[in-house]
Every structure is written in C-alpha cells, then in structure tokens.
Amino acid sequence: MKHEELVYPYGKPLITGLIKSRPEDFQVVEELSFEPSGAGEHLFLLVEKSGLSTPELVDRIARDYSIHPRLIGFSGLKDKHALTTQWLSLHLPGETAAAEAYVADGYRVLRARRNRSKLRRGSHRHNFFKVCIRALDDLPADSRSQLDIFSDQGIANYFGTQRFGRSHDNVAQALKRLDQPRLKRSQRGILLSSLRSELFNQILSRRISMGYWSKPLDGDVFMLRGSHSIFSAELDAVLAQRFASLDISSTASLYGEGQSRLAGEALQIEQQVFAENSAIIQCLDRQAVGRQMRALRVAVENFSYELDAAAKTLRLELRLPAGSYLNSLLDHFIRVSEPDRQAHFR
C-alpha cells in the first residue's frame, strides 16, 4: 500500500511546507524512562549531534574512546539532518568518566554518568520535538482545526516512511531477500520490521476508513497509555470514558507466531488484511518472529504551534512516546518535503 493512500482521521492535508532546511529546524531530545544510577561498568553519555546518523555517531564515539562499536548501546535512532540529543552507553569498566561538555567532531557530550547495565533499544520513554516548517503559504481554518484536535484526540499511530527505506522498497526487498542465508542480522531486522509495519498500517487505515478508530470496537484488545500493558474487556460506560480520555487505545497485531488476542469484528478486519497480503504472511511465517501488539492511536503531549505569517513559518513543539513518528503526525495536516541534499554533490 502506498503511503499516500493511507487514510487519516481528520481529513486530507491541505497545505505544503519544507522541513529540515537547517539542523536547528528539526530538534529532538530523547528522554529516558530512568535515571542512570551513578555507579557501574557502563558510562552513559547524553550526546548532542548534528549531521550524523546514530550509527555514524556510534562509530565516531568508538573511535574517540578507543572501544569497539559493539560495546556501545543506544535506545533509539535519531535523524541525521537535525539537531538531536540522545543517550548512549559505553562499556568502560574501571575507566574514569569523561568530563561533561566534551566537544568532538560532529557531537558534544552534555552529561556523563555511570550505570550498572548497558542501554537497551527502546529504553527511552519519550522524544521531545521542536520543529520549524518553512515555505508555508497559508494556514487555513481547516488546517488549524486539524492541529487543534491533536491534543484532545491523538493521532493515528502509523509507522513512518523511514520504516520502508529511502527508496520506499523495503517490502519488495524483504520478499526477495529474507530467505537468503547470508543476510546480515541488522538488515534482516530492518526488512522484517518493514513487512510487519506494512500490515499494521493497512489495518489501521482500514479501521479509520470504516469509522472504527475514534471509538472502541467489539473484540478489541486495549493498551494502557504510557506502557505496553494490554488487556481485553467488555465494552461498557467506564471503558468508553477511559477510551475517550486517551487513557487506553485499541490495538492491532504486529504479525508473527501465536494466536491473535482479538475477537469479533476487530479480528475480522485484521484477518481480511492478512488474507489480502498472502505473500507477506508466508514470508513472515518462515521467519519465526513472535506476534506483538501496537496501539492504533497515540496521545500527543505538550502540543503547541505558532504561525509567523510574515516569515511563512510554522513552529511546533510536542512530545511523543518512543516508537511513534513525528512524520506521521505531520502527515495528518501537511505534505512536507526536504531539501535536495544531493544537489550539493553535483
């Protein structure tokens, strides 16, 4: 399914704009779900970077600290063409902690603190964003209405376009390559994720088109806000109120081994999507990956926006939970593009 074919709950975007014109136009701060303890074999660094992807940052820090990259842990991947702050852990038993405000090529260390265990993927709770959208000709009333509803009703929790590769061909590549015995583990994980993300996005789009996104559905499994805890329950007034307040949300499967916990109409919708994507299902069945659940919507916290009509800019501030995509939020009200960075190399 092409990304532009996905259905969004508040209508189609009516405006266009430009993002990531400058690194400071796209700022991301990673917020851990815990505070490093202050003691242990792992040195946690809070690092600000610009012009580096997270893997490039890991390689550069490995060089500067004279350790192997596999001894460095991180929680999430952060954009290259942005000003981002994220945590990394270095396995440095017995070493003296680096000084804060250490400045190196493309990054600087803001904090350094010891911890007993390494930083695992997905250990952060939120990402805080400051985004400037440029080349904005107008912000009509319908677009303002789309923006104003985010804080009250949340957004569709689509996987962003980055899940599907720079050329948007990860799904096709996965169907061709996942059975190859020499495929690198990291590449295998990326391709597996793209297949499961494709199925999830289709389920979510179909539920929105059927009107089964902004209210609970018979047979739903629910996820508690701020956690990955899931449960099933009969629909009643209490559950409906919790759903309306964004305390809980409906979920859909990230396809894998095991029976779905969904039932009734919720299960039927999911099974229809799976039946229509038999090649993806067969490929995933050969990979022995476990089934998981993902919320169909996500709450947007601390959301605000400011329009500068003279400068043709729109500034956003917001907080999203880990695993949700800023680009997916933007897709709810605007079609954005990025500068042609290849032009600098022609």
Image (cartoon, rainbow, N blue to C red):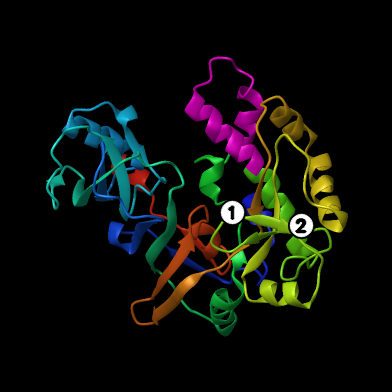
> Do residues under tags 1 and 2 come within 8 Å of each other at their CB atoms?
no
User: Who's the residue at 51% across and 28% down the image?
Assistant: 187
User: Who's the residue at 50% across and 25% down the image?
Assistant: 185
Please state the horizontal and vertical placement of residue 72, each as a whole percent of the image.
31, 34
Horizontal placement of 295 versus 110: left or right? right
Quarter of the image with the C terminus in it: top left
Instruction: Tell me the quarter of the picture where residue 332 sits.
Output: bottom right
- Mark 1 is on which residue type? His
- Mark 2 is on which residue type? Arg
Horizontal placement of 281 versus 246: left or right? right
Q: Earlier in the sequence, mark 1 or mark 2?
A: 2
As helix, strand or loop, the secondary structure at mark 2 comes to helix
> In the orientation shown, which residue stands out farthest toward the bottom?
141
Residue 98 or residue 130, whichever sits in front:
98
User: Who's the residue at 77% across and 45% down the image?
Assistant: 260
As helix, strand or loop, the secondary structure at mark 1 comes to loop
Disc 1 and disc 2: Cα gap in Å? 23 Å
- Looking at the image, is mark 1 or mark 2 nearer the viewer? 1
Residue 115 higher or lower than 279, as above or below = below
Residue that label 1 marks:
228
Horizontal placement of 295 versus 60: left or right? right
Main SS of the magenta segment? helix
Residue that label 2 marks:
206
Neighbour tally class for label 1: few under 14, some 14-19, many 20 plus, Cα within 10 Å: few
Please state the horizontal and vertical placement of residue 165, each as a whole percent of the image.
52, 40
Horizontal placement of 31 versus 232: left or right? left
Can residue 1 be seen here? The reply is no
Magenta residues, start to end:
169-196
Q: Is residue 183 magenta?
A: yes
